[in-house]
Image (cartoon, grey):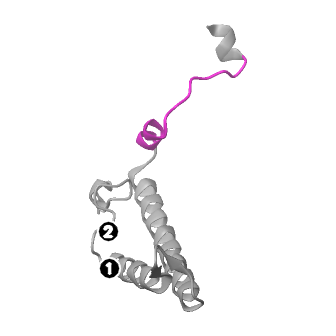
Amino acid sequence: MLLLLRFGYHAEVSSQQRDLLKPESQLLRERKRNRSIMHAILYLAAIGSFVAGRQGWELNGLSATFFGIFLLVYALLGHCNVNIWFGGPLDPRNDPVEHE
């Protein structure tokens, strides 16, 4: 066992265990950043779907424009502080509490 540790073989640490070792302020910043990145991806997907629908693309017989509008409304709700991440890994209810 000592030889394994000496040569750098360490047990795998899950991401949840690593998160427990990080300070709460860093976790909060990372979660907010991840939500912002996902909002940007939602906006890009909405714009892409809208443009594709205007060029004649369809999803199961329905114009992709409607899917783009749906994604846009979904992303806008997220920016209006509606919890669109409910029950998922980015759910704000799972954020660490900010200490003042």
Circle 1: element type: helix
Q: Residue 93 sits in which quadrant?
A: bottom left
3 in relation to 90, above or below: above
* Res. 77 mark: 1
Residues tagged 1 and 2 counted as in contact (Cβ below 8 A) = yes
Residue appearing at x 46%, y 45% in the figure = 22
- Residue 70 appears at what percent x and percent y? 38, 80
Q: Quadrant of the N terminus?
A: top right
* Res. 84 mark: 2
Q: Earlier in the sequence, mark 1 or mark 2?
A: 1
78 in relation to 12, above or below: below
32 on left or right of 50: left
* Residue at the extreme bottom of the image, as rendered: 54
- Residue 25 appears at what percent x and percent y? 41, 57
- Residue 29 appears at what percent x and percent y? 45, 62
Label 2 crowd (10 A; few <14 / some 14-19 / many >=20)? some
41 on left or right of 96: right
